[in-house]
Image (cartoon, rainbow, N blue to C red):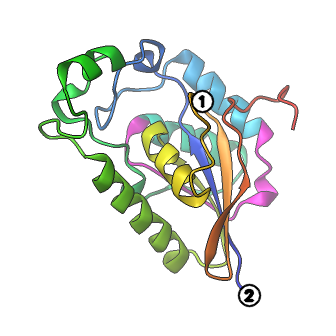
């Protein structure tokens, strides 16, 4: 039976990550730490484990993907629009506290993507990955909110654990086999050569 493997790598750090601001689809670039995190991740990632690299169209993901793909000679990272971060609409730029205090229901923000809409998009992404890249090992660079939802779907609610943050440049791996997705490995910590594996 065909086995498809998807590695979900979160982009490196941005200045808005430091301030816990909602980035959503606002195109905030990697900062110096984020570039260093992408380089560290590229060292940890084994090029022989992956066939291709996909990325969200936002520059923080694209630049992370380029660093990882270039260092590992994995070719040009391909844009996959479904890897885009959740849109937070007019709340983008707010801190998490401001977002929660300003909107009674954070799913109803003008111009924003609700959690049910994000979940539907995440399921569509999983279907697309299997249909377009069946039998491949795909490293996909994306964003925290989308990766959290994908983890919840594939782990059937086990991950991420309550109160657990996904570090920038963390990598979790899914496998699709016999018609089902499963979590092959879950790592919320930032990839680093010193990280015990």
Image x and y of residue 46, in percent: 80, 49
Q: Residue at x 19, y 26 (%)?
A: 103
Is residue 17 inside the magenta stretch?
Answer: no
Q: Residue at x 43, y 53 (%)?
A: 83
Task: Name, please, the residue furthest toward the top.
Answer: 19
Secondary element at image label 1: loop
In the picture provided, is 134 more to the left or to the right than 187?
left
- Please tell me how crowded label 1 is: few (under 14), some (14-19), or many (20+) other residues with Cα within 10 Å: few
On the question of residue 155 being in view, the answer is: yes
Depth order, front residue of 153/52: 153
Q: Quadrant of residue 7?
A: bottom right
Q: Residue at x 32, y 35 (%)?
A: 24
Q: Nearer the viewer, mark 2 or mark 1?
A: 1
Q: Residue at x 17, y 35 (%)?
A: 109
In the picture provided, is 176 more to the left or to the right than 12?
right
Q: Quadrant of residue 174?
A: bottom right
174 is higher (above) or lower (below) than 128: above
Secondary element at image label 2: loop
Q: Quadrant of residue 191?
A: top right
Work out how far the residue at label 2 is from the one at label 1, CA to CA, in angstroms: 34 Å
Depth order, front residue of 162/50: 162
**The N terminus lies in which quarter of the figure?**
bottom right
Q: Which residues are magenta?
A: 44-59
Q: From the image, tell me which residue sits under label 1.
A: 164
- Please tell me how crowded label 2 is: few (under 14), some (14-19), or many (20+) other residues with Cα within 10 Å: few
Q: From the image, tell me which residue sits under label 2.
A: 1
């Amino acid at each position: 039976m065909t086995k498809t493997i998807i590695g979900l790598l979160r982009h490196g750090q941005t200045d808005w990550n430091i301030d816990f601001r909602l980035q959503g689809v606002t195109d905030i670039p990697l900062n110096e730490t984020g570039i260093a995190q992408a380089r560290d991740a590229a060292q940890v990632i084994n090029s022989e484990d992956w066939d291709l690299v996909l990325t969200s169209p936002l520059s923080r993901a694209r630049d992370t993907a380029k660093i990882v793909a270039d260092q590992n000679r994995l070719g040009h990272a391909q844009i996959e629009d479904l890897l885009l971060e959740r849109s937070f609409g007019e709340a983008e730029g707010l801190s998490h506290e401001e977002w929660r205090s300003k909107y009674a229901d954070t799913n109803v923000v003008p111009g924003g993507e609700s959690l049910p809409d994000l979940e539907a998009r995440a399921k569509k992404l999983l279907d697309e990955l299997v249909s377009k890249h069946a039998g491949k090992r795909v490293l996909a660079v994306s964003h925290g909110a989308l990766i959290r939802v994908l983890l919840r779907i594939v782990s059937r609610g086990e991950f991420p654990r309550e109160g657990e943050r996904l570090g920038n440049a963390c990598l979790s791996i899914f496998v699709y086999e016999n018609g089902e997705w499963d979590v092959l490995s879950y790592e919320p910590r930032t990839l680093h050569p010193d990280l015990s594996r």
